[in-house]
Image (cartoon, helix red, strand yellow):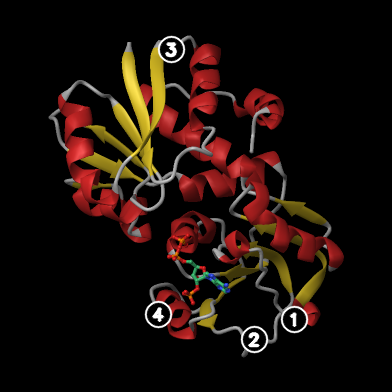
Amino acid sequence: MDRYALFGNPVAHSVSPQIHAAFAAQTGQALRYEKREVAPADFRSAVDDFFTSGGKGLNVTLPFKADACTYAARVTPRARAAAAANTLWQDSDGTLTGDNTDGIGFVRDLAVNSLIRIDGKNILVLGAGGAARGIFGPLLEQHPARLHIANRTAARATELANCYGEHVTGGGLENWPDTRFDLVVNATAAGHGGAAVAPPAELLARAWFGYDLSYGAAAKPFLDWARTHNAARVLDGWGMLVEQAAESFYLWRGVRPNTTEVLRDGREWRP
Ligand code: ATR
């Protein structure tokens, strides 16, 4: 049976094996998908061992996404732009290839599953780390009117914004632009410590949406804050997780699973 795996540290919480098992059952693909906690120093040798022993494809999560992008001999433009890869496989010529499906997973969850329009909207992204970088390319392809990146370390946000066009701006958590935001995306790691990064309430549009890229307990502080600030809708990263998995599955197998069933049924085993 074809073997796939998730490498990360930690991985105990991950439900990716259940998601991929559901996709495999639905599409009639014979495969096995496991998760493996890899010591940081062993990442590259673990990747080599996996493929040498016949493994077909890897998902990579924290803290290895940047290393996966550097280690892959070939990367897609969207992985290069994000400086992070979450999906690895060997091309027909044996070349280790990396892609990043996080951003497209995020956009699909917004635009297709949640019917939230991005074009012409003002978007605020909180955070300028790896999670934020992963979504910018696919997000900008949807033509928002404006994208502002706000980060605790302002220089990191302005540097990132300078990589894009003039409708992308960056700054710290003190100087906010004079804009009403339709969508606020939390891409900070603050929720892991039980805190929420909160923009001033007067910057929120009348019917605004709150989206946290994480899910489970880590998403709660931001989503609670969004609810108390009258967000028309709040979403955690569950849909994004399922959609990025579907895109990886498609890259590996050439078959696109229907995510509707997993989005619905998976709520029983999601963290
Ligand atoms: P990831 O790959 O998960 O994005 P990262 O690269 O370490 O991880 O980035 C974490 C992000 O969360 C950064 O934007 C970080 O802000 P800094 O660039 O100033 O470090 C942000 N972050 C983490 N903890 C935070 C907190 N308690 N308050 C505000 N922002 C926080």
The amino acid beneath tag 3 is: Gln
Gap in Å between the C-alphas at discs 2 and 3? 49 Å
Is residue 153 visible in the rendered image? The answer is: yes
Mark 1 touches mark 4? (CB < 8 Å):
no
Residue at numbered disc 1: 200
Q: Decide if ligand 1 comes within 8 Å of the CB at mark 1.
A: no
Alpha-carbon neighbours of circle 1 within 10 Å: few (<14), some, or many (≥20)?
few
| Badge number at residue 176 | 2
Mark 2 touches mark 3? (CB < 8 Å):
no
Residue 64, given in percent of the width and then of the height, sits at 33, 50
Gap in Å between the C-alphas at discs 2 and 4? 16 Å
Is residue 92 visible in the rendered image? The answer is: no
Which mark is first along the chain, 1 or 2? 2
Q: Residue lying furthest bottom in this view?
A: 175
Alpha-carbon neighbours of circle 4 within 10 Å: few (<14), some, or many (≥20)?
some
Judge from the rendering whether residue 32 lies leftward or rightward of residue 117; answer left or right: left
What residue is rendered at 22% in x and 37% in y?
A: 46
Alpha-carbon neighbours of circle 2 within 10 Å: few (<14), some, or many (≥20)?
some
| Badge number at residue 159 | 4
Label 2 SS: loop
Which mark is first along the chain, 3 or 4? 3
Mark 3 touches mark 1? (CB < 8 Å):
no
Label 3 SS: loop
Mark 4 touches mark 3? (CB < 8 Å):
no
Residue 136, given in percent of the width and then of the height, sits at 48, 61
Residue at numbered disc 3: 29
Gap in Å between the C-alphas at discs 4 and 3? 43 Å
Gap in Å between the C-alphas at discs 2 and 1? 8 Å
Foreground residue, 70 or 79? 70
Which mark is first along the chain, 4 or 1? 4
Label 4 SS: helix
